[in-house]
Amino acid sequence: MIKLWAKTISGEKITRDQIYKREEKYSSSKFDEYLNEICYEFDIPSPLILKTHVNHFDNFNIVRFRKSDFIEEVDYDYLVIENVLE
């Protein structure tokens, strides 16, 4: 089971958060699919996903998308996706 904690951060405060769950094993090739579903639920634009983002998530269980990773204007400083380990 995949459990990802997604949150938007402005300054030092969390402005939105949710736990994304999916009944399958994590696959780095589907990371863009997970992220698009999270962004759809938040009603925010999807960021550009680089190989370094996926590698960072795979190695450290967390990835941070900055404002510069989005094409559209966003109202927060970071979108953070964190793997929830049990």
Image: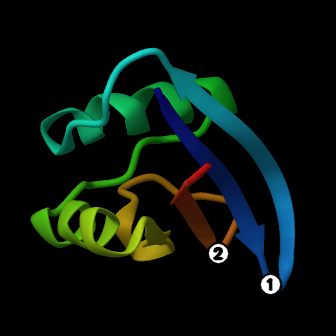
Q: Earlier in the sequence, mark 1 or mark 2?
A: 1
Q: Which residue is mark 1?
A: 11
Q: Secondary structure at mark 1?
A: loop
Residue reaching furthest to the top: 23
Q: Nearer the viewer, residue 53 or 75?
A: 53
Q: Which residue is mark 2?
A: 77
Q: Position of residue 72 (x, y in %)?
A: 45, 52
Q: Quadrant of residue 38?
A: top right
User: Could you classify mark 2 by the number of other residues whose Cα lies within 10 Å: few (under 14), some (14-19), or many (20 or more)?
Assistant: some
Q: Nearer the viewer, residue 8 or 67?
A: 8
Residue type, numbered disc 1: Gly
Identify the residue at horizontal 45%, vertical 15% (top origin). Answer: 23
Q: Which residue appears farthest toward the front when viewing the image?
A: 86
Residue at image location 47% in from the left, 71% down from the top: 64
The answer to which of 62 and 52 lies nearer the viewer is 62
Give the x, y percent position of residue 4. 55, 44
